[in-house]
Image: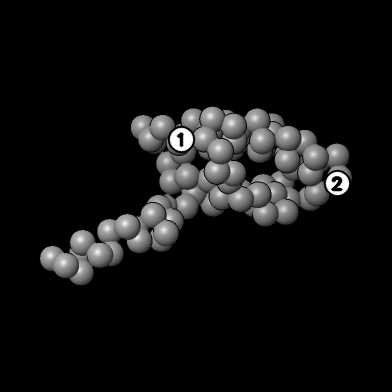
Amino acid sequence: MLLISGNEIGQRAVQHANVIAAAKKSGVKRIVYTSLLHADTSPLNLAPEHADTEKTLKASGIDYTILRNGWYTENYTGSIAPALAN
């Protein structure tokens, strides 16, 4: 199962834990999770929720793969116009 990180900051750890619990109950064999680059050591305010999800995954007993993605491309689109202008 692919678990793509939710977008409700402050709610994601609980939402992800619910998804992981449902996956376990349903017999899912592996979860692939889109986490955050250096989630366990990052000072970013988004990191704790990702780190919590990673801990929940590890404790679930389900096989897992954690993808620690860098910044997503859509986060750069606001910089395109100024970059082109300069």
Tell me the quarter of the image containing the C terminus.
bottom left
Task: State the scheme by which the image is colored.
Answer: one colour
Residue extending farthest bottom: 84
Q: Residues within 10 Å of mark 1 (few under 14, many from 20)?
A: some
Q: Nearer the viewer, residue 48 or 27?
A: 48
Q: Residue beneath label 1, please?
A: 47
Disc nearer the start of the sequence (2/1): 2
Q: Nearer the viewer, residue 77 or 23?
A: 77
**Residue sitting at 85 percent across and 46 percent down?**
27
What residue type is disc 1 on? Ala
What residue type is disc 2 on? Gly
Residue extending farthest left: 86
Q: Nearer the viewer, residue 55 or 2?
A: 2
Mark 2 touching mark 1, by CB under 8 A?
no
Label 2: element kind: loop
Q: Position of residue 73 (x, y in %)?
A: 41, 61
Q: Residues within 10 Å of mark 2 (few under 14, many from 20)?
A: few
The label number, if any, that marks residue 27 in the structure image: 2
Q: Position of residue 64 (x, y in %)?
A: 67, 47
**Residue sitting at 41 percent across and 32 percent down?**
45
Query: In which quadrant of the rendered view does residue 26 lie?
Result: top right
